[in-house]
Amino acid sequence: LVPWSDDLFEKYYDICEELGSGQFAVVRRVVCKATGEEFAAKFIRKRRYATSRRGVTRAHIEREVDVLTEIGGHDAIIRLFAVFETPSEVILVLELVSGGELFDHVCAKECLDEAEAAAFIKQILLGVKHLHSRYICHLDLKPENVMLKRRGETQIKLIDFGLSRRIPPGSQTKDMIGTPEFVAPEIVNFEALGTATDMWALGVVTYILLSGGSPFLGQTRDETFCNITAVDYHFDDCYFHSTSALAKDFIRRLFVRDPRKRATAEDCLRHPWITGP
Ligand SMILES: Cc1ccc2c(c1)c1c3c(c(C)cc1n2CCCN)C(=O)NC3=O
């Protein structure tokens, strides 16, 4: 179990440069004073008053910590080492990865060749399969949340479980969350979410890795949502002229409106595009 300490964070860690920031959290590189080891510390601002719109509720933070504690043992999932709490924030001490975002890797190359894309997607599938085996959904899968352990290697780490939660089968969990261009039809239609919601997002990630384009992105949020609920996408010849039929079939099995008919992580790991020749 991960210790929750109200000891002074700065007593144990030197705080270094900012790595990224979100709505209510900042991530910084930190160094453990005793060992010189580097970590990523996620400083999450606590919500002060129930009526406040700023900050994150403690229950929400505990959900992220519980998820990371339960699934942190898997190679494709970022590890949580410790939690510190101050009156105004909770600090998660997380494994530091040095390879940057998969997103940067794709941008650097515009798009990846199929073998490289399939290798990354297989890694992500193994991590997602681990999450889903415990009915935990990430709910914010996108290239920015897939980090490379080390530059030039395919070992990936799924990060940012701030929206993740356990959704047992049959539960009617509904919520309007996630990043518009990656959300599944059930999110747009405010219908039951589940592990299949992550699989749709994985389809979007795969489409982006292979083409550099985003399948459902419209000029406005509403146009994007319209494209999603109509499952209105196509393989632009300018991007996909040299993409194999297998890769397109892999994506087609994820862009399925009915979550019950959508391919699962297990189905995808058995798909010939992933198992390879
Ligand atoms: C080298 C580097 C650069 C940027 C980083 C990270 C590491 C990073 C990390 C984490 C998170 C939640 C965000 C992070 N960011 C912010 C951007 C993530 N999309 C994390 O949990 N471990 C990281 O190394």
Image: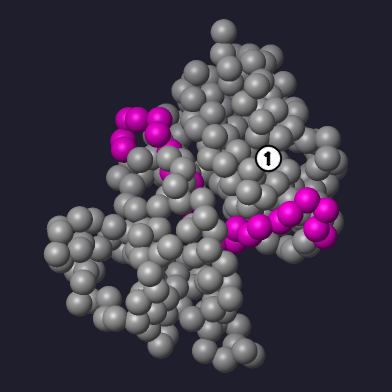
- The residue identified by callout 1 is 199
Q: Quadrant of residue 255?
A: top right
In the image, 234 versus 5, the foreground residue is 5
Q: Position of residue 26 (x, y in %)?
A: 40, 68
Q: Quadrant of residue 92?
A: bottom left
Q: Quadrant of the C terminus?
A: top right
At label 1, which amino acid type do we have? Met
Write the residue at 51% across / 51% down: 71
Write the residue at 75% across / 29% down: 253
In the image, 43 versus 34, the foreground residue is 34
User: In the image, which residues are magenta?
Assistant: 150-172
Classify 134 as above or below 25: above
Callout 1 crowding tier (Cα within 10 Å): few <14, some 14–19, many ≥20: many
Magenta-drawn stretch, dominant element (helix, strand or loop): loop
SS at badge 1: helix
Write the residue at 31% across / 36% down: 151
Write the residue at 53% across / 63% down: 66
Classify 67 as above or below 184: below
Please indicate whether residue 33 sits to the left or right of residue 154 in the image: left
Q: Please say which color scheme the image uses.
A: one colour
